[in-house]
């Protein structure tokens, strides 16, 4: 049996995840996470926990421009799914490696793992979707990435186009430090916020969390179901009518946060009745497939400012999406989209607006 030290094992596990396909990696511990939000409590998933390995898996840049310009949706969805599966697989593989090395460990799935609420109130799914362990907080504290204005984790290699991963362990590991603020390329330009017309990210206020005596800030969240309504594909038309996400939905978005969960409850049955699109995946939160139709705030954010501007232009100048009876999607001009909707019978139109 190898006699590991906190230093040698930390170096080994970070090298392990990088060899398995991660782009960046870091280590957080009970001490470096002390004082953080509940989702930084490693003992929630592993009572014996002492450390966690945090890492990022890149989404291929080649699929982003065709996606944002509304030329190809499926490739980006497939690529993001691949990155999620790799992230979960790396965490599981590291768990196995550490277990055989004598340390209890717990792999955290890349996505769709939420804490059950105990409010006693009837809710939609697991709202407000608090994770068992926050990949984002651990990534920022360990230096696997850094917070952008959007609240997404960024890296200097891939921007925000990464999927995060975590493996919690009873091993004592030497922690790594956060990335220095001067190395964070996010300049609060705000294109990420402009690309999200759900209003989930507050344009004025920021949230600051203290994790291990270090502050981390990003845009304050409003009702999370704002993102669910748009990113989930129920609605995708920008209020100005000139551009859309990949969703053919055209529901108006209310200003009041309290209106979103009732809105989803009243429109979800119509969403279920829309023709099936290509791709998609089953989701634990609803009784239907969900399709990648947004993720704009994540995919726009590139380390190069010129690329960010070009991507925002692609998103906002390439028309809107309509859906045909066979489920296929088409990018058309706003004027043609209006004609398409006007030609629908009343029952079909009610599926989208």
Image (tube, rainbow, N blue to C red):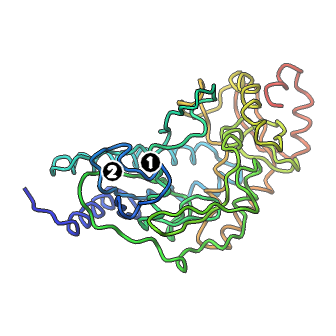
Tell me which corner region of the image, top left, top right, bottom left or bottom right, holds residue 317: bottom right
Instruction: Examine the rendered structure and indicate whether residue 81 appears above or below residue 310.
Output: above
Contact? badges 2 and 1 (CB < 8 Å): yes
Q: Please tell me which residue is depicted at 30% across the width and 50% down the height of the picture.
A: 49
Q: Residues within 10 Å of mark 2 (few under 14, many from 20)?
A: many
- Give the structural element (helix, strand or loop) at label 2: strand
Residue in front for this viewpoint, 282 or 193:
193
Tell me which corner region of the image, top left, top right, bottom left or bottom right, holds residue 330: top right
Q: Residues within 10 Å of mark 1 (few under 14, many from 20)?
A: many
For mark 2, what is the residue?
168
Instruction: Examine the rendered structure and indicate whether residue 349 appears above or below residue 104.
Output: above
Most extreme residue toward the bottom is 182
Q: Is residue 3 left or right of residue 307?
A: left
Point out residue 338 in the picture as x, y percentages from the top left corner.
91, 38
Q: Is residue 166 left or right of residue 255?
A: left
- What is the quadrant of the C terminus in the image? top right
Distance between the alpha carbons at the discs numbered 2 and 1: 9 Å
- Give the structural element (helix, strand or loop) at label 1: loop
Q: Is residue 257 left or right of residue 241?
A: left
Point out residue 126 in the picture as x, y percentages from the top left corner.
56, 33
Q: Please tell me which residue is depicted at 32% across the width and 55% down the height of the picture.
A: 20
Name which of mark 2 and mark 1 comes first in the sequence: 1
Point out residue 48 in the picture as x, y percentages from the top left corner.
27, 47
- What is the quadrant of the N terminus in the image? bottom left
Point out residue 138 in the picture as x, y percentages from the top left corner.
44, 58
Instruction: Examine the rendered structure and indicate whether residue 4 appears above or below residue 106.
Output: below
Residue in front for this viewpoint, 159 or 142:
142
For mark 1, what is the residue?
133
């Amino acid at each position: 049996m190898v006699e590991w030290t906190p230093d040698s094992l930390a170096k080994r596990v970070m090298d392990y995840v990088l060899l398995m396909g991660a782009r960046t990696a870091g280590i957080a511990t009970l001490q470096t996470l002390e004082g953080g939000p509940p989702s930084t409590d490693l003992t929630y998933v592993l009572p014996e926990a002492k450390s966690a390995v945090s890492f990022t898996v890149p989404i291929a840049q080649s699929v982003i421009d065709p996606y944002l310009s509304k030329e190809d949706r499926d490739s980006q969805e497939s690529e993001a799914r691949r990155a999620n599966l790799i992230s979960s697989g790396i965490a599981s593989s590291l768990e196995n490696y550490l277990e055989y090395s004598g340390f209890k460990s717990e792999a955290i799935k890349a996505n769709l793992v939420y804490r059950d609420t105990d409010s006693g109130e009837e809710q939609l799914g697991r709202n407000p979707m608090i994770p068992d362990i926050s990949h984002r907080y651990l990534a920022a504290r360990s230096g696997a990435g850094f917070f952008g204005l959007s609240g997404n984790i960024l890296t200097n290699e891939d921007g925000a186009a990464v999927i995060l991963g975590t493996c919690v362990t009873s091993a004592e590991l030497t922690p790594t430090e956060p990335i220095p603020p001067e190395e964070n390329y996010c300049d609060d330009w705000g294109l990420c916020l402009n690309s999200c017309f759900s209003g989930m990210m507050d344009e004025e206020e920021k949230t600051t969390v203290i994790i291990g005596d270090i502050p981390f800030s990003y845009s304050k969240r409003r009702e999370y179901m704002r993102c669910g309504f748009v990113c989930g594909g129920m609605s995708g038309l920008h209020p100005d009518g000139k551009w859309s996400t990949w969703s053919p939905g055209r529901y108006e978005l209310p200003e009041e946060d309290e209106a979103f969960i009732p809105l989803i409850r009243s429109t979800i049955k119509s969403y279920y009745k829309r023709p099936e699109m290509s791709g998609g995946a089953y989701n634990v939160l609803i009784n239907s497939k969900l399709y990648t139709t947004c993720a704009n705030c994540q995919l726009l954010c590139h380390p190069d400012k010129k690329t960010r501007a070009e991507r925002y232009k692609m998103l906002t100048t390439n028309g809107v999406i309509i859906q045909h009876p066979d489920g296929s999607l088409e990018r058309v001009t706003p004027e043609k989209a209006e004609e398409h909707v006007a030609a629908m019978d009343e029952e079909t139109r009610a599926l989208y607006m």
